[in-house]
Image (cartoon, rainbow, N blue to C red):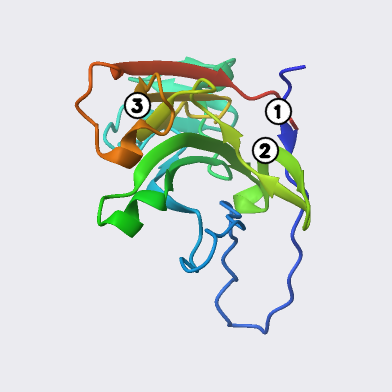
């Protein structure tokens, strides 16, 4: 329980020199009932961070010498998570409820999803979900069940074993409260939530 699983691999064939195919990691497959013939959800605020964060090249004090980390001319032979793994990155996105769009309102953010990608994007952490149309890979949920979440900020330590995230999270007493436009009702409880996650090797 609680161990992150890898999503099943996706294998594609393409010609030499052709762009590498993109991979759909949100896998939104449900639609609203007619006459609204469009998906019930949409993707909002996708985020990406390489290992070490976007400012990984900001300092010239850190360099590698073999398997050792050199910081200001001091050599550390057992740096642990301090050596950067360039083959990993992390990402997140939140999905939104499209139903308010029919009444001219904005999409309402719902859940926050995240993954660690490894092997240069070949493998992703996540789960599989089974629906009437089949079994599909999905990323894991970052926020607490029953809350709404959006606008995550993410980063990872240099070797990609830890992910750090902060995001907006709130809760309606009535989960569909936003459908009638009552965003400012006293039923809303909003907070900034921080979470650290550790990824186990190969999982």
Give how far apart the Cα atoms at labels 3 and 2 are.
Answer: 20 Å
Label 2 element class: strand
Which residue is labeled 3 in the image? 167
Circles 1 and 2, Cβ within 8 Å, touching? The answer is: yes
Label 3 element class: strand
Disc 1 or 2, which lies upstream in sequence? 1
Nearer-the-camera pick, 36 or 81: 36
In this image, 74 relative to 12: left or right? Answer: left
Q: Residue 107: percent from the left, percent from the top?
A: 33, 49
Would residue 152 be visible to someone looking at this image?
A: no
Would residue 184 be visible to someone looking at this image?
A: yes
Label 1 element class: loop
In this image, 203 relative to 171: left or right? Answer: right
Q: Name the quadrant of the C terminus.
A: top right
Mark 3, residues whose alpha carbon is within 10 Å: few (<14), some, or many (≥20)?
some
Which residue is labeled 1 in the image? 4
Q: Residue at x 44, y 36 (%)?
A: 110
Nearer-the-camera pick, 197 or 157: 197
């Amino acid at each position: 329980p609680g161990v992150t699983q890898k999503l099943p691999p996706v294998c594609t064939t393409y010609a030499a020199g052709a762009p590498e195919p993109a991979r759909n990691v949100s896998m939104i497959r449900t639609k609203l009932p007619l006459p609204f013939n469009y998906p019930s959800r949409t993707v909002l605020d996708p985020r990406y961070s390489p290992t070490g964060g976007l400012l990984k090249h900001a300092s010239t004090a850190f360099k590698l010498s073999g398997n050792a980390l050199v910081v200001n001319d001091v050599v550390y032979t057992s740096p642990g998570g301090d050596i950067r793994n360039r083959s990993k990155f992390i990402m997140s996105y939140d999905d939104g409820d499209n139903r308010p769009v029919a009444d001219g309102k904005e999409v309402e953010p719902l859940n926050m999803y995240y993954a660690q990608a490894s092997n240069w994007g070949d493998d992703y952490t996540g789960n599989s979900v089974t629906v009437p149309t089949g079994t599909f890979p999905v990323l894991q949920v970052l926020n607490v069940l029953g809350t709404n979440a959006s606008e995550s900020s993410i980063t990872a330590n240099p070797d990609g074993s830890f992910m750090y995230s902060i995001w907006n999270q709130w809760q309606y007493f009535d989960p569909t409260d936003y459908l009638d436009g009552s965003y400012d009702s006293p039923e809303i409880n909003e907070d900034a939530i921080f979470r650290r996650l550790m990824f186990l090797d190969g999982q």
